[in-house]
Image (spheres, rainbow, N blue to C red):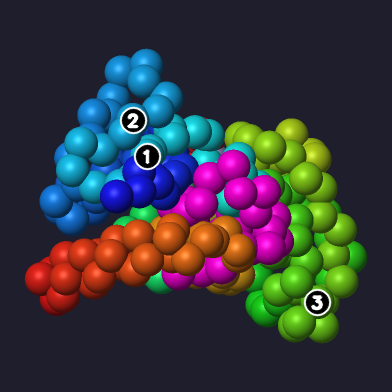
Amino acid sequence: MSNTNIRIAVQKSGRLSDDSLKLFKECGIKFESGGSKLRSISSNFPIEFLFLRDDDIPGYVEDGVADLGVIGLNVLEENRKDVEIVKELGFSKCRLSLAIPRNEVYTDLSYFEGKNIATSYPNLTNTFLTSQGVTAHTHEISGSVEIAPSIGLAEGICDIVSTGGTLLSNGLKEVAEVFKSQAVLISNKSLTAEKRSILDKLTFRIDSVQRGQN
Ligand code: ATP
Ligand code: ZN
């Protein structure tokens, strides 16, 4: 009997965490989570959990520090890491959208031609605008993106929206969707045969949980 564990990175605390832990528990995998613990080995499945900042997860999976990870497709596509997407997980659904001050008149995407857009997602924003024939300047900021227009940093923003409440309270309106996201399970591209067979068992269980929800 081998004692190989597959190692999976999940977000320590944030909008991916609760549903990630819930999914693995529904798969019948027992492990401890919460508190200050950053690693946890399951008592009944060959898996070890690492609890990390979500942004670091794709890089760890690419490097093989973790074999698997749960990450928002938005973060994965923005950072363009060389990993395999195993499956969509159906939670943490959100969208990346362009927004402008509420009192501006918006016609179409040409509105953004030559304008400055503040975003934490410059690659996704530029890819979208270029595909639509629009050339704009992205200005990367790491947080509080919604404040940018009111302080004169940019004319528009491109940010994650779920309900639109944050936009509204900052005097902004959503005008175009750039990218749709949800949580995905990713894997390192060169898993050993042994780890691949553990991954197969895991995805089999995830499939059953997902079938039960439909
Ligand atoms: P960390 O401190 O780990 O870096 P974070 O602030 O970057 O956390 P969260 O806000 O927890 O990240 O969001 C994690 C992911 O959850 C996002 O990258 C996105 O895929 C998804 N997400 C973001 N906002 C929402 C939302 N309002 N509803 C559902 N999912 C969301
Ligand atoms: Zn993050």
> Which residue type carries mark 3?
Thr
Q: Which element carries disc 2, helix, strand or loop?
A: strand
> Which residue type carries mark 1?
Glu
> Which residue type carries mark 2?
Ser
- The image position of residue 122, as x and y in percent, is 75, 56
Residue farthest to the front, as pictured = 1
Q: Which residue is labeled 3 in the image?
A: 130
Q: Which element carries disc 3, helix, strand or loop?
A: helix
- The image position of residue 36, as x and y in percent, is 37, 16
Depth check, front residue: 85 or 16? 85
Q: Are marks 3 and 2 in contact (CB under 8 Å)?
A: no
Q: Which mark is residue 48?
A: 1
Specify start and end residues of the magenta stretch as a single range.
62-86
Depth check, front residue: 33 or 106? 33
Q: Are marks 2 and 1 in contact (CB under 8 Å)?
A: yes
- The residue under the point 79% across, 39% down is 152
Depth check, front residue: 211 or 99? 211
